[in-house]
């Protein structure tokens, strides 16, 4: 049992680890995920006692090893705990044979160094006995990595720390290494520090996400990767390259900085509140997941519960419920008549529902007030119609401010949002009328207008179906950028599942007023449950040469 | 990696000490006529082996010359030889090594064979051999030492130039059409500079030592004023007390010069090697 | 990686490993150029040795033997020497005669000692070997140990003290160190003899002899060790500093290796390589060191011999000593090169 309590490590007055709490039991493999500078290697090194400047407690079977003297530490290093380092290139002494170096690991702990034992160790990592007679420079990267693992295993340690075990390996060797490590990890406490999320997914049971020296989220690996609940974890997953990514890659604005006051992530977080700048959030259990966030993780922004609406005998929306989380895009996919537009209008308040409720940030929404419109806005399918043909660009974009009696500064604010949507903010352009703009420009003006009040939620009803393909691509990219920069949450309504796939994190499929399937986009696409969904996917546009299977 | 070498040297205590010593000795050598009324070859009226007095700060030697004067002028010899060899040898090294690296091909191969051949020859032997016959004076010593010394530097310069040639900022310059002279001036020589200085300091140090050694052995020009020569003569009279103000000052002066050069060279070389520079706390320190 | 069968499809199996063969050929070529350099160097020295005296204007015999010798020489000896060295024949034939004589081990005749040069040298050589040899071993060992400890504790008190101390010591030229030691311990305190390898006319044997030799050896040995320590120390120290930053040191610490093991078995062993390779570069310093110390202490070795022959202008003796030293230097360089291949396992494999 390895318990780490409030571990703090500082280099030259700069905190690298700022209070880490972890506990691992035998047989568990924990991944510590983080980007460079987060402190993963420092964590490993401090557990091994190879660093100065550590405070807190590290309890190995109840014994605080952080306070051990150098000689006592040396006795457990390599024996009860072992670490395999990241940089494989010069991790082995160039002048001694491999077998000598493995033997040394045993000898320094007064073990019985039989040649047979060395051979067994080599075999256990998949290397033939003859390799023992070679020198490090004769081995490939993967082989060196295996030797390091063999050395770490030599005394059958309780705790094994692996620092980026597959970093410099090619894909095939990586797969072999993962298989080997899984074998090796049985009956040990294993900590894997890495930035490679796909590998961590294959290798580990639990995952902890490290940001600026603190753990921000921790939970079962499979769950965490599928449904990340901390804004940083979600951002990290969105920027990872892997075969399940359907939506385009998105980065996280800003960069990691150590030593800021309050929550380490708050400057880059799109759902921050006042408290985040002053207090450090504590890692707490929230529904089976450990999250360090004052808002309890990613907050649900919009909740729709059992919404109903009839037009005469037609049940346009027949008991629809879903939750839209802050900072994500939910695509509502359905053919015309499925009720998606009615649903959107009920959300924004243009139509009253017959039953059910809409909640925004937890509060039930009745009549739509000024505050509501400051938080939720909508963009429509046909931009030239959604803007009055009598208003020029400036008037159109300013209109929400005028309506809300915003006072002075309207022009500046208009220019800011125009810049956000990549339109010129100069005189001549501001005077143009909708019929003088291209489709793409008009839609951008509409988006600018929607953004001027600074909403959190954008409802987009088929925003690109009236536009040419090349323009559509640019508008979509714009929307994604806005989401990345401003943390916009989007309810994206479309009939085009291929489009939905490209823009959304989650997808809900509507048919006849009901949501028949809902889930993370790549899951819905790759393993659709409902027949209708499958039909939609099969008939979606496909540029490959294969004949569609009927 | 950008390093301010001057700061590296003046920053370290060793470097500072070295520079101060060299500065001091140079100042003394340059202002020699101001610091003594005698001519170094002049046989004064005081008796031989006289003890230090206000007329003769270090007394007189066996032929009634003022020791202090000879000490000061001896500094000129040592510094001249050191400086001369440093400059000449480095010049040759850069010329041959640099052009070999830039032009490559048969030219490079030819010169490198020459370099290898000369390096294989133990220069000390040749110097002693030649000096025995020629009894060289300062100028000839400079020439001799430089001729035997330049190949070592040429190898280093060639290696450095080759690696500098491949640097990305040089490739970038070539893509905007820069000529080789531009590249040499703006990209290669500035980076080469500190290495050249380090080399020159080492050359100077070796040269000063060799000159003193040759003079001590008695195989240099007898009319040259040299600390080594002073020590050679003084040694014969070791049974008299005169060694205290004849042998010792010469030896100390020589040692100081060498120490000064060593310290300066060492601190510069430490600054040059990125791995040796003082680093802040790194993992694995306990 | 290496030794893999590299064969083009369709080519018959010649029964041998092609890559091994090409490696061998490349190695052989490298060895020949390697030896060639040394051969050339040797040739240059021989030529210099031959040419220099003959460049002097005037009588070659005069140039070779010097004026003093000629005065002493009898006409018969003169005639014999002229005939032996073919001095009345053309340059080329003289050169050939010179080389042939060398091959026979005939290095000339020392007029001062009235013996064959080779015999004179072999009488003095053992003392040099004793002094220089032991000094070399002791200074290397101490230099290595101090360098390792200093490098390990870089920046701390021990390192700073050792570094400044040894750099200071390094500034003193070899002969001055010797003189100082002699003055302090010999003249000043009277603890040690002022010259010689043995107390003259003492006829000691056995243990007493050994004791006497040691008594005379102490001061010059100390002087030499002091002179030679610094370069080994500096190089070892600097190499230690860079080696300690390498990855495998961290691996060793993680394995649980103790301080001693890391310092010596890992860092120290790896730091040896540059020290060995630079031995060749330090040879000139070794030679001057041994030379000067012997002279200062009037120790009866090859150094003193050289000095005396310089004073007396015994040209054949001078040339003989220098030639032998050159050969020794070249031999040592060769040995070092070969040794390096054994020490560094990375070097053996063709890249």
Image: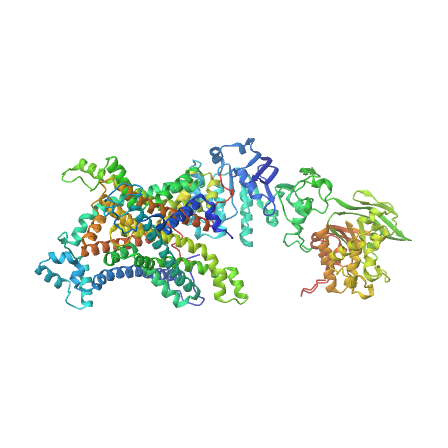
Tally of marks = 0
State whether residue A93 is above or below residue C59: above
Residue B24, given in percent of the width and then of the height, sits at 40, 47
Residue C264 appears in the rendering: no
Task: Tell me if A39 is positioned left or right of A424 in this view.
Answer: left
Farthest residue, direction top = A62
Residue A547, given in percent of the width and then of the height, sits at 69, 65
Task: Tell me if B83 is positioned left or right of A386 in this view.
Answer: left
Q: In this view of the protein, which residue sits in the foreground, A212 or C49?
A: C49
Farthest residue, direction front = B45
Residue A311, given in percent of the width and then of the height, sits at 90, 53
Residue C255 appears in the rendering: yes
Residue B150, given in percent of the width and then of the height, sits at 36, 59
Task: Tell me if C324 is positioned left or right of A156 in this view.
Answer: left
Task: Tell me if C41 is positioned left or right of A352 in this view.
Answer: left
The quarter of the displayed image where residue C9 is located? bottom left
The quarter of the displayed image where residue C103 is located? bottom left
Q: In this view of the protein, which residue sits in the foreground, C316 or A540?
A: C316
Colouring method of the image: rainbow
Q: In this view of the protein, which residue sits in the foreground, A512 or A480?
A: A480
Q: In this view of the protein, which residue sits in the foreground, C111 or A192?
A: C111
State whether residue A71 is above or below residue B38: above
State whether residue A55 is above or below residue A465: above
């Amino acid at each position: 049992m390895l318990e780490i309590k409030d571990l703090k490590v500082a280099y030259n007055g700069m905190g690298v680890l700022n209070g880490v709490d972890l506990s691992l039991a035998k047989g568990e493999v924990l991944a510590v995920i983080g980007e460079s500078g987060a402190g993963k290697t420092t964590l490993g090194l401090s557990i091994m006692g190879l660093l100065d400047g550590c405070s807190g407690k590290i309890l190995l079977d109840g014994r605080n090893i952080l306070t051990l003297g150098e000689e006592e530490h040396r006795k457990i290093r390599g024996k009860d705990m072992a670490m395999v380092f990241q940089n494989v290139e010069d991790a082995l002494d160039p002048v001694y044979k491999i077998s000598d170096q493995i033997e040394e690991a045993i000898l320094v702990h007064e073990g019985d160094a039989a040649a047979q034992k060395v051979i067994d160790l080599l075999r256990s990592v998949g290397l033939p006995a003859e390799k023992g007679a070679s020198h490090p420079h004769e081995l490939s990267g993967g082989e060196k990595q295996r030797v390091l693992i063999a050395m770490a295993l030599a005394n059958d340690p309780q705790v094994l720390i692996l620092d980026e075990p597959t970093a410099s390996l090619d894909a095939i060797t990586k797969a072999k290494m993962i298989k080997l490590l899984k074998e090796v990890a049985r009956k040990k406490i294993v900590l894997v520090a890495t930035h490679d999320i796909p590998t961590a997914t294959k290798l580990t049971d639990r995952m902890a996400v490290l940001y600026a020296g603190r753990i921000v989220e921790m939970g079962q690996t499979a769950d965490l990767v599928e449904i990340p609940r901390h804004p940083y974890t979600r951002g990290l997953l969105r920027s990872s390259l892997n075969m399940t990514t359907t939506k385009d890659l998105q980065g996280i604005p800003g960069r990691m900085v150590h030593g800021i006051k309050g929550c380490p992530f708050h400057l880059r977080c799109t759902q921050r509140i006042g408290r985040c700048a002053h207090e450090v959030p504590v890692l707490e259990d929230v529904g089976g997941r450990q999250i360090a966030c004052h808002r309890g993780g990613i907050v649900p922004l919009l909740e729709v519960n059992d919404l109903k609406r009839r037009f005469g005998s037609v049940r346009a929306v027949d008991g629809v419920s879903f939750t839209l989380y802050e900072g994500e895009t939910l695509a509502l996919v359905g053919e015309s008549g499925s009720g998606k537009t009615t649903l959107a209008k009920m959300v924004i308040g243009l139509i009253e529902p017959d039953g059910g409720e809409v909640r925004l940030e937890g509060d039930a929404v009745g009549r739509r007030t000024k505050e509501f419109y400051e938080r939720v806005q909508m963009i429509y399918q046909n931009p030239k119609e959604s803007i009055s043909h009598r208003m020029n660009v400036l008037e159109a974009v300013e209109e929400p401010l005028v309506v809300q009696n915003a006072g002075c500064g309207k022009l500046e604010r208009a220019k800011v949002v125009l810049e956000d949507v990549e339109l010129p903010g100069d005189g001549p352009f501001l005077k143009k009328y909708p019929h003088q703009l291209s489709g793409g420009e008009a839609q951008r003006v509409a988006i600018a207008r929607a953004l001027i009040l600074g909403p959190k939620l954008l409802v987009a009803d088929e925003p690109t179906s009236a536009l040419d393909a090349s323009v559509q691509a640019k508008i979509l990219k714009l929307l994604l950028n806005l989401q990345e920069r401003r943390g916009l949450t989007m309810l994206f309504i479309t009939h085009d599942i291929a489009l939905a796939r490209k823009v959304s994190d989650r997808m809900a499929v509507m048919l006849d007023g009901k949501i028949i399937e809902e889930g993370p986009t790549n899951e819905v696409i790759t393993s659709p449950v409902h027949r209708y969904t499958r039909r939609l996917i099969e008939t979606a546009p496909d540029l490959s040469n294969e004949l569609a299977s009927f | 990696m950008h390093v301010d070498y001057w700061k590296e040297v003046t920053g370290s205590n060793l470097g500072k000490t070295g520079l101060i010593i060299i500065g001091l000795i140079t100042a003394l050598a340059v202002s020699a006529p101001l610091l003594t009324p005698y001519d170094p070859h002049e046989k004064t009226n005081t008796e031989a082996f006289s003890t230090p007095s206000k007329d003769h700060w270090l007394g007189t030697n066996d032929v009634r010359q003022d020791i202090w004067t000879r000490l000061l002028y001896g500094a000129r010899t040592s510094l001249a030889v050191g400086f001369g060899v440093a400059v000449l040898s480095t010049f040759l090294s850069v010329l041959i090594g640099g052009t070999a690296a830039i032009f490559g091909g048969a030219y490079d191969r030819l010169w490198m064979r020459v370099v290898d051949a000369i390096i294989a020859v133990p220069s000390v032997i040749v110097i002693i051999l030649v000096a025995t016959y020629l009894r060289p004076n300062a100028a000839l010593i400079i020439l001799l030492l430089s001729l035997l010394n330049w190949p070592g530097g040429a190898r280093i310069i060639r290696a450095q130039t080759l690696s500098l040639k491949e640097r990305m900022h040089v490739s970038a310059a070539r893509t905007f059409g820069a000529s080789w002279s531009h590249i040499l001036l703006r990209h290669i020589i500035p980076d080469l500079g500190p290495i050249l200085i380090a080399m020159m300091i080492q050359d100077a140090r070796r040269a000063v030592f060799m000159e003193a050694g040759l003079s001590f052995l008695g195989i240099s020009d007898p009319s040259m004023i040299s600390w080594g020569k002073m020590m050679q003569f003084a040694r014969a009279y070791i049974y008299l007390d005169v060694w205290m103000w004849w042998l010792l000052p010469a030896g100390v002066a020589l040692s100081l010069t060498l120490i000064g050069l060593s310290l300066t060279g060492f601190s510069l070389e430490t600054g040059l090697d990125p791995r040796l520079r003082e680093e802040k706390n790194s993992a694995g320190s306990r | 990686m290496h030794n893999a069968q590299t064969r083009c499809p369709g080519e018959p199996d010649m029964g041998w490993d092609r890559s091994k063969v090409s490696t061998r050929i490349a190695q052989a070529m490298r060895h020949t150029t390697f030896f060639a350099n040394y051969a050339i160097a040797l040739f240059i020295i021989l030529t210099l040795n031959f040419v220099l005296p003959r460049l002097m204007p005037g009588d070659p015999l005069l140039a070779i033997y010097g004026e003093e010798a000629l005065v002493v020489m009898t006409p018969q000896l003169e005639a014999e020497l002229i005939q032996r060295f073919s001095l009345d024949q053309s340059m080329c034939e003289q050169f050939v005669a010179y080389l042939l004589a060398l091959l026979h081990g005939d290095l000339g005749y020392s007029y001062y000692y009235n013996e064959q040069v080779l015999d004179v040298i072999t009488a003095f050589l053992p003392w040099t070997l004793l002094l220089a040899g032991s000094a070399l071993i002791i200074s290397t060992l101490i230099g290595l140990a101090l360098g390792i400890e200093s490098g390990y504790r870089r920046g701390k008190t021990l390192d700073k003290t050792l570094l400044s101390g040894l750099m200071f010591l390094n500034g003193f030229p070899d002969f001055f160190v010797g003189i100082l030691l002699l003055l302090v311990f010999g003249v000043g305190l009277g603890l040690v003899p002022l010259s010689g390898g043995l107390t003259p006319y003492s006829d000691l044997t056995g243990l007493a002899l050994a004791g006497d030799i040691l008594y005379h050896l102490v001061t010059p040995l100390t002087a030499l060790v002091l002179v030679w320590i610094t370069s080994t120390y500096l190089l070892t120290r600097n190499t230690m500093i860079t080696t300690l930053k390498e990855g495998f040191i961290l691996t060793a610490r993680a394995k649980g290796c103790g301080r001693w093991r890391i310092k010596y078995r890992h860092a120290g062993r790896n730091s040896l390589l540059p020290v060995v390779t630079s031995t060749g570069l330090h040879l000139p310093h070794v030679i001057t060191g041994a030379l000067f110390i012997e002279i200062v202490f009037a120790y009866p070795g090859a150094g003193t011999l050289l000095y005396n022959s310089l004073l007396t202008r015994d040209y054949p003796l001078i040339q003989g000593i220098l030639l032998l030293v050159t050969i020794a230097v070249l031999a040592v360089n060769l040995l070092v090169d070969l040794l390096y291949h054994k020490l560094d396992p990375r070097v053996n494999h063709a890249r």
